[in-house]
Image (tube, rainbow, N blue to C red):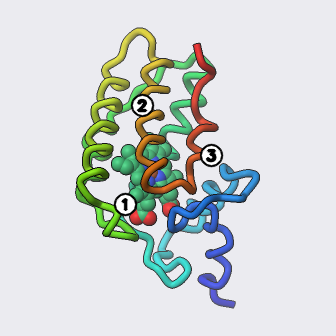
Amino acid sequence: MHLNKIIPFLLLAFVGCQDSTDPNPDASVIEASKQSEGITVVNGVERSELALTMRLMYDQMKLVSDSLKDGKTIHTNYLNRYKSIHTDIATEPEKIDEVYQGLAENFIAKYDDFEKSTSDRDLAFNNMLDACLACHASKCPGPIKAIKKIKLREI
Ligand code: HEC
C-alpha cells in the first residue's frame, strides 16, 4: 500500500486552492499535518513552500484564536517567519503577481499590528484574519471557510 495513494483524499480540502466541500475543514488540517512528515507529493504535485508556510500560519493562528477565546496571555514572535510569503515558491507560480504582493504586504502590516497590539487584541486579530481572507478571496478560495472559523466573535 503506497501512502501517496491515500494522502490526496486527506488533503483534498486545501490542496490547489479549490473550493472545499469538506464539512469539517479543521479535521483535514490536523489529519494532513500528522501525515506531512516526509511526504511531499500530493496528487502528483509537490507541496510548495508557500503551502507549507500557509499551513504553519493556519495552525499557529488557530492556537492563538483558542488562547484568546480562553482569555489566556499569548506570546507570538512569528513576523519574520511569515514574511516568507513574499518569496516562497507557490503551487501555481502564476498567482504570485503584483496583486498578490500588495495583498501580502497588507497582511504582513496587519499581522505586525496584531503582534504589537496591547489593548483590543481581539479586534487586531480579526483585522489580521480579514487580511488573510482578502487575499484568499482573489487568489485561493478553498481555505476561506476554515479561516473564517478561527475568527473571534465580533465585538
Ligand atoms: C497574499 C495572499 C495570501 C495571504 C495574505 C494568505 N494566504 Fe493563505 N494561501 C494563499 C495562496 C496563493 C495559497 C496556495 C499556496 C500553494 O498551494 O502554493 C494559500 C494557501 C493556504 C492554505 C492551504 C495550505 C495547503 O496546505 O495547501 C491555508 C490553510 C491558508 N492559505 C491559510 C491562510 C491563513 C490562516 C492566512 C492568514 C494568517 C493566509 N492564508 C494568508 C494566499 C494567501
Residue depicted at 44% across the width and 71% down the height: 47
Is label 2 in contact with label 3 (beta carbons under 8 Å)?
no
Mark 3 or mark 1: whose residue is earlier in sequence:
1
Mark 2 or mark 3: whose residue is earlier in sequence:
2
Residue under numbered circle 1:
50
Determine if residue 56 is in view: no
Q: Name the residue nearer the viewer: 112 or 22.
A: 22
Residue depicted at 57% across the width and 56% down the height: 142
Q: Position of residue 11 (x, y in %)?
A: 61, 67
Q: Name the residue nearer the viewer: 112 or 140.
A: 140
Mark 2 burial class by Cα count in 10 Å: few <14, some 14-19, many 20+: many
Which quadrant does the C terminus fall into? top right
Q: Which mark is residue 128?
A: 2
Tag 2: amino acid: Met
Q: Under 8 Å from ligand 1: the CB of mark 2? A: yes
Q: Is residue 140 above or below residue 126?
A: below
Q: Position of residue 57 (x, y in %)?
A: 44, 46
Spatial distance from mark 3 to mark 1, Cα to Cα? 19 Å
Q: Under 8 Å from ligand 1: the CB of mark 1? A: yes
Spatial distance from mark 2 to mark 1, Cα to Cα? 18 Å
Q: Is residue 137 above or below residue 33?
A: above
Tag 1: amino acid: Leu
Element assignment for label 1: helix
